[in-house]
Image (spheres, rainbow, N blue to C red):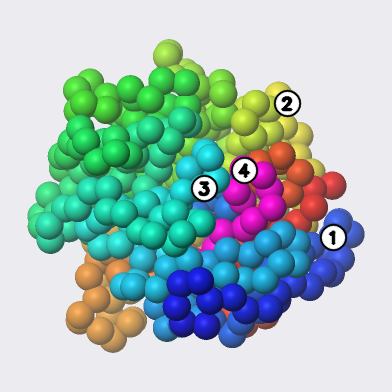
Amino acid sequence: MNAPGSVSPSEHSVFEDQATHVRVHQMTSHPSINHATYFLQSSFTPDGETLLFTSYRTGTAQLFEAGFPDGGIRQLTGAGAIHPFSAAIHPSGELVFFVRGGEILELDRGTLKERVIVSFADAQLGECSPDRKGEWLTAAIKQGSQSGIVAGRVDGTRWTMIPFPRTVIHPQFHPLDPEWIEFAGDPAPRMHRVRRDGTGLECLYQHGNDEFVVHETFLGDTGDLVFTVWPKALCRMNWDTRRITTISEFNAWHITPNRAGTLVLCDTNHPDEGLFLVNVDGGGRRRVCLSGASNQGSQWKTSRYALKEDFERARSAAKSGALSWMEVAADTVYGPQWTHPHPSFSPDERLVVFASDRTGHPQVYVAETP
């Protein structure tokens, strides 16, 4: 398998989770890095019949899809390596957006034809995120010494770069008002918002590096934000008043709310007690299954953001002066990301997709919710 359109047999198997006894589907088994899309996006097509994932089985990060539960595996991309966590499925399910270097592309799943939506010279883009209707896209950008976000229409028009003085990650459109984009500045203070046209930039919460705010996202259709203060609590912020309330005090890590904003799916770390569903009203939680992931990254053993000395220490440990601080962050300080479960819901919210390197190689799993 080494070209778009190539199909290989199913790698599907099923086992019972040791802790909760739910059925878990192992969707991949190739001895390479395999993982689902990022936790801010669904890995399933809207009809729930196909699972999108990234695999390095051809030597570089490429997109693949598998029929759920036991369909064959089809390769979707095959040119230069993609950003491994950049894929986002259009609401129609027919198109997939992804990043390759400084370009955002659109892939037609039927024809496998790629179309460049926008290109930024000498730049690296982060994962792309569409609005609810699939009309607008946004992504973080690093172009030379300038960081920021870019946003524009899927048809390639009205693209704008919005500069920011620090590294930007995880920009997302407000689910009810795509004029607004929330994004994270790294390190603190973390949470910001800006209008799509670049106006109205503001910090939503002032805090220092010793308050480890991470993985913020929108709390479904409530329009509020939900985030973790690692490793202490899962919290909610009112979008209008900025009032912060605690949903539950435990080590919730990567978080994905359901569309109604009544449940939050999360993984855990230090200790890893598995994947959980948390009730927003009252904070009660129930375990979905164990993750079995190695959950690497030295910074998750602390309760603060990585500072310059952390990156230098990690760079020295890696014994490679060629590593940039971003590579060090991804591979030692905050990752590797493919060792993290990054759970997300299926469209009907009855299934949970996650990654785990429990077998020695990261693979894609789907758990049936209890």
Q: Nearer the viewer, mark 1 or mark 3?
A: 3
Kind of residue at badge 1: Arg
Answer few, some or many: residues within 10 Å of disc 2's Cα (few below 14, many 20 plus, some between 14 and 19): few
Assess disc 1: are there few (<14), some (14-19) or many (≥20) residues with their C-alpha within 10 Å of its C-alpha: some
Residue hosting label 2? 282
Q: Earlier in the sequence, mark 1 or mark 2?
A: 1
Which comes before the other along the chain, label 2 or label 4?
4
Residue at the disc numbered 1: 23
Q: Secondary structure at mark 2?
A: loop
Tell me if I can see residue 2 in this picture. Answer: yes
267 sits left or right of 216 in the view: right
The CA distance from mark 2 to mark 3 is 38 Å
Report if residue 20 lies within the magenta region. Answer: no
x, y percent for residue 111: 46, 59
Give the mark, 4 or 1, whose residue is nearer the N terminus: 1
- The residue lying at 35 percent from left, 58 percent from top is 114
